[in-house]
């Protein structure tokens, strides 16, 4: 007899994962290696350790170890907000009049308001263990910068954040949370770095991009003794730390004998999506189960659905290693009217390779329909979702409505990556009816693709 499914499925503290899962270990065809842009040879541990903490560099290059122990100090920090609940969206199901069962993994129950804290505390921990003075980073909508400032404050590390200029201006409260935790926040591109000066000269009046901010943060790290750069998405090490999301999700489903039919996640750089789907994709790779996995991205920054699978710079200033990924080109800068986050020009190499192999599908959606879904969800489920999360909500609703037409009782699981309480300028634009959709033209993308690096 099946257990009655509650509104919220909670794991006990002792059921929280003690190891992170590295899905690359179970991939027969591994993601392509990072390349040194000068030699076009795979980056070495020594080269990567000049930018990242050494232990994080080791995690980045390791595609054979399936599980990494989570240090006790990180697990103790996780206990402040983990395990996070897996919630059955009964009210949304009723509103949609669908036979589908909808579940969401909620990652917003911490002060940073998102899943980003899962990796922020890990990266800050390894920086502290290495005896560093501080770290530098970039942030787009601000979730990562907020999470890292929290983690650094907890461990007494200096934190320097380069925030995409349009977000810096649109989201002053997110900026002030970072400053409250002691971080120095600089709008990017700035005139504080050589690469920032170069970008401002090349793109006068630019509102910035994650690629720009990454370049500045890397330069700031390598030019200061005792500092290293940390990244909030894209990299394999970040997906490794975020696997705690998927591991908890699967454990909660297994606890009640629920088999997910469809798993949906928003996709920007790939950290949330990769973390959510890792254990499920691992089952698929080993032939143990099958799932319909959907990555949802904004139509204004559609790397999976309209990008090319090629080696590209991870940053606009072209100071980082080359990564093989679905990309719009490192010089691509989303329109300033794009308010929904997920603005990175590329996609995680791990997620990209899984997509190329057919283990997941991708869908792009316009931001007005995303905010329509966010509003519906807020009204019936009582949580104001982050714009990023709302991309997944949009497709979850669409799939549940399909089930209403077909009568299928699918189990739909999506990642609710965080809350939208610092995103009220975007909500205001939606409520005032002045939000518009932007879709880059084929000509714009082709110009960007033409500038991709030539790799032998």
Image: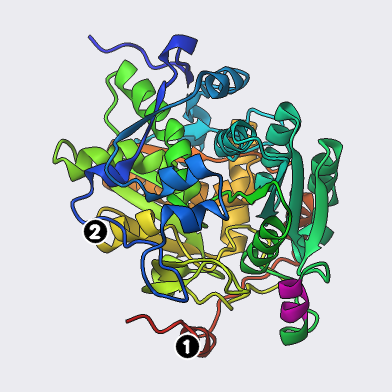
Q: Which residue is mark 2?
A: 358
Q: Which residues are magenta?
A: 194-200
| Residue 5 drawn at (x, y percent) | 38, 17
Q: Which residue is mark 1?
A: 446
> What residue is shown at x 40% (from left), y 73% (from top)?
311
Image-quadrant location for residue 126: top right
| Residue 145 drawn at (x, y percent) | 70, 46
Image-quadrant location for residue 79: top right
Which element carries disc 2, helix, strand or loop? Answer: loop
In the shown orientation, is residue 315 left or right of residue 256? right
Which element carries disc 1, helix, strand or loop? Answer: helix
> What residue is shown at x 55% (from left), y 80% (from top)?
440
| Residue 386 drawn at (x, y percent) | 64, 45
Q: CA distance from mark 1 to mark 2?
A: 25 Å
Instruction: Look at the image and tell me in which quarter the C terminus lies.
Output: bottom left
- What is the crowding at mark 2: few (fewer than 14 residues within 10 Å), some, or many (at least 20)? few
Q: Is residue 419 magenta?
A: no
């Amino acid at each position: 007899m099946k257990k009655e499914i509650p509104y919220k499925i909670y794991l006990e503290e002792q059921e929280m994962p003690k190891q992170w899962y590295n899905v690359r270990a179970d991939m027969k065809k591994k993601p392509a290696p990072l390349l040194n842009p000068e030699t076009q040879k795979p980056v070495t541990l020594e080269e990567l350790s000049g930018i990242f903490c050494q232990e994080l560099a080791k995690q980045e290059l390791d595609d054979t170890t399936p599980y990494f122990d989570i240090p006790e100090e990180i697990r103790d920090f996780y206990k402040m907000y983990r395990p996070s609940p897996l919630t059955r969206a009964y009210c949304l199901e009723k509103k949609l009049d669908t036979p589908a069962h909808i579940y969401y993994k909620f990652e917003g129950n911490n002060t940073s308001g998102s899943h980003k804290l899962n990796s922020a505390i890990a990266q800050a921990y390894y920086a502290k263990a290495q005896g560093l003075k501080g770290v530098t980073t970039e942030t787009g909508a601000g979730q990562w910068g907020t999470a890292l400032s929290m983690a650094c404050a907890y461990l007494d590390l200096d934190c320097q954040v380069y925030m995409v200029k349009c977000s810096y201006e649109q989201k002053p409260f997110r900026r002030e949370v970072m400053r409250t935790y002691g971080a120095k926040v600089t709008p990017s591109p700035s005139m504080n770095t050589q690469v920032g000066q170069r970008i401002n000269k090349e793109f006068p009046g630019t509102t910035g991009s994650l690629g720009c901010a990454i370049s500045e943060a890397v330069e700031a790290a390598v030019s200061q003794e005792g500092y290293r750069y940390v990244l909030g998405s894209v990299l394999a090490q970040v997906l490794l730390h975020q696997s705690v999301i998927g591991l908890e999700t699967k454990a909660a489903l297994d606890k009640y004998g629920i088999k997910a039919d469809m798993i949906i996640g928003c996709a920007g750089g790939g950290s949330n999506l990769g973390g959510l789907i890792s254990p499920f994709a691992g089952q698929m790779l080993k032939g143990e189960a099958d799932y319909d996995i959907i990555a949802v991205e904004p139509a204004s920054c559609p790397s999976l659905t309209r990008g090319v699978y090629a080696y590209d710079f991870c940053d606009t200033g072209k100071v980082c290693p080359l990564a093989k990924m679905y990309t719009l080109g490192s010089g691509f800068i989303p329109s300033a009217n794009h308010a929904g986050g997920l603005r990175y020009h590329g996609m995680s190499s791990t997620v990209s390779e899984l997509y190329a192999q057919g283990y997941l599908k991708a869908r792009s959606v316009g931001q007005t329909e995303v905010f329509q879904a966010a509003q519906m969800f807020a009204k019936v489920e009582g949580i104001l979702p982050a714009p990023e999360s709302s991309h997944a909500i949009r497709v979850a609703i669409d799939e549940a409505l399909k089930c209403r037409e077909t009568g299928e009782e699918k189990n739909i699981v999506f990642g609710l990556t965080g809350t939208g309480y610092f995103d009220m300028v975007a909500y205001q634009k939606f409520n005032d009816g002045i939000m518009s959709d932007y879709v880059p033209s084929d000509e714009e993308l082709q110009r960007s693709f033409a500038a991709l690096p030539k790799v032998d």
